[in-house]
Amino acid sequence: MTGALVHLRGPRATGMLLTAPAAMLLLVLFFYPLATLFLTTLHPDNIENYARVVSSGTYMQVFLNTLRLAVIVTVIDLVIAYPLAFYMCRLTGGSRMVAFFLLLIPLWTSQLVRTYAWMVLLGRNGPINSALMALGLTDTPLRLSNSEFAVVIGMVHILLPYMVLPIYSSASKIDRSLLEASRGLGAGAFSTLTRVLIPLTIHGVLAGVSLVLVLSLGVFIMPALLGGGRVPVIPLLIEQQAGSFLNWAMAGTFCVILLAMVLVIFWLIKLSTRLLVRGRVHA
Amino acid sequence: MTNENQAVLDVQKIRKTYGRVEALREIDLRVAAGEFLTLLGASGSGKTTLLRIIAGFETPDSGRVSIRGADMTWASAAERQIGMVFQNYALFPHLTVLENVMFPLEMRRITRRAAADRARAALDSVHLGVFGDRYPRQLSGGQQQRVALARAIVFEPSLLLLDEPFSALDRRLRESMQQEVKQLQSSLGLTTIFITHDQEEALVMSDRIAVIGGGAIRQIGTPAEIYYHPNSISVATFVGESNIFEGAPKGRSFYAASGAHFSLAAPTDCNRMLIRPEAITLSRASVPADPREANVFAAQVLDRSFVGGFTVYRVRLAQGDEVSVRAIAREDAIFQPGETLQLTVAPADCRPLTDRSAA
């Protein structure tokens, strides 16, 4: 009796108590519907949906396209975010506040609003086309909107903070004297980047990559509004099955496969973390 | 090719300002091959700025930095062949101890195997041969310090810079590291610039000391020169304990403002004078003394503090000057507050401060 009580004390029990409300919420609102969905797709009436999806060239093409788009967006975000995160580390006081504000404002604005903003910007008579024509770079307006280009731009913009913040977090922990030590010991800028900076920020990079990759697999609004029907991705298929065809079982099958993709990606990233961050004691 | 008179490091007329703050006024400094030179100064004196300009992490507003005769003022830190030990060691946390020490060799395109051999030898020289596979965070502060040292010397740099490397260590460890670094430095003949605000450390380790204050070199010389012949109050008070008298010189005499008269060993025209506390003798017996051999005063003990090997007395001369005295602490010669004693100090120990420009 007392033994059981003692057992419930300590940091572990405290942790469980503190996370209990959140865990309950997730269990009821997230895990339960997900499990129901999963079970529905396994129903004898629906199980052959999996075979239908996997054997269909069109559907598989959409899966590949979704993945390709996610990889493109992730790579572009990484290239933008990495130097940006380091730049933000060097800012102090007011200018750092401003930088964070600018980075975080998009997160506080509705995705829908931002997507419409991009529709306006990229539109046939939008400011970008007007500027290009005024500069004489093109005679007729370019078709910027309703294209994969537009979708990529929109996604890169919306997901950028998810890449910057984890990289910033690991970059801000780097002691500047390490960079000076590297330079002083004879390393050029490139060697300092590859031998010191990247290894020291690899946790942040992998965290950012997994966030952006996974989030971009599930993005719906941008392909729907900026793609003009030319950018087929899984979330659009799910919406179509559930919304237009009322085929919940098929929508569920897509969901489960998408979820499986996400889990595989997480597993791969975890694996690569172990390979890249060899031997280092985790903080 | 090598010229014996050629300085390894030649710093000429270096100036540096940050905004309106003049960090370095006009620094000239030459360091000879194999020399151990210490930049001694309080924080904010400019010593760190000077070190960073030498290392190539900052550029001067004007002036020139040459290393082995080559102009390096605008060269990157990587080009300068300078080994540096940072105050916080700056070991790469993602590399093992051995990999840390191999780093500068690999940057010089030395094969991995040769680099590993040389790095192991360097680790052996700081007695850390068996720790090669550990990560820096698994080592103590003193051990990290040695790794940083091994990494800084493994590529045989022209110049070794040590930026307050012992400030984070406890006293005992600091003293043993001082000895060890000094031994390593002289056995390898490394030209070394050492930064510290600790005057004792500077006196123990250096061939020469440059006392820095207010962005300028106040005085440069051997530890003995700096200690026995400081040129200004700022140097005298920074290095060691001091009694400073202001007054008027007259030939071989010095009249303190209080009226106390001191005989000097040589004529001077300085109006400030230094007497080190340990140069003063206190005694109960009143021995008549020749004023040319010794300055004799009556003095009353104000208070005393026992510091183990010696006792520090604060006494007041009959003329009114308060003087601090360091006496060897013999148990049978401990004076009580209130006692009136005879105070003697040799004329040679009354040292005029020559630099009148600096307070």
Image (spheres, rainbow, N blue to C red):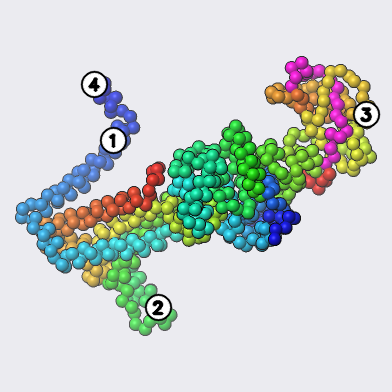
What SS does tag 4 mark? loop
Examine the rendering and report whether any part of residue A155 can be seen. no
**Any mark on residue A143, and which?**
none
Point 49% across, 53% down: residue: B114
Q: Nearer the viewer, mark 4 or mark 3?
A: 3
Q: Which residues are magenta?
A: B329-353
Residue A39: give x, y in percent of width and height: 12, 49
Point 30% across, 51% down: residue: A271
Residue B133: give x, y in percent of width and height: 44, 43
Q: Chain of mark 3?
A: B
Q: Chain of mark 1?
A: A
Q: Residues within 10 Å of mark 3 (few under 14, many from 20)?
A: few
Q: Which mark is first along the chain, 4 or 1? A: 4
Residue tagged 1: A16
Residue tagged 2: A132
What SS does tag 3 mark? loop
**Residue A137 or B273: which is nearer the viewer?**
B273
**Any mark on residue B291, and which?**
3
Q: Work out whether disc 2 and disc 4 sit on a shared chain.
A: yes
Badge 2 amino acid? Leu
Image quadrant in which you'd find residue B16: bottom right
Q: Nearer the viewer, mark 3 or mark 1?
A: 3
Q: Residues within 10 Å of mark 2 (few under 14, many from 20)?
A: some
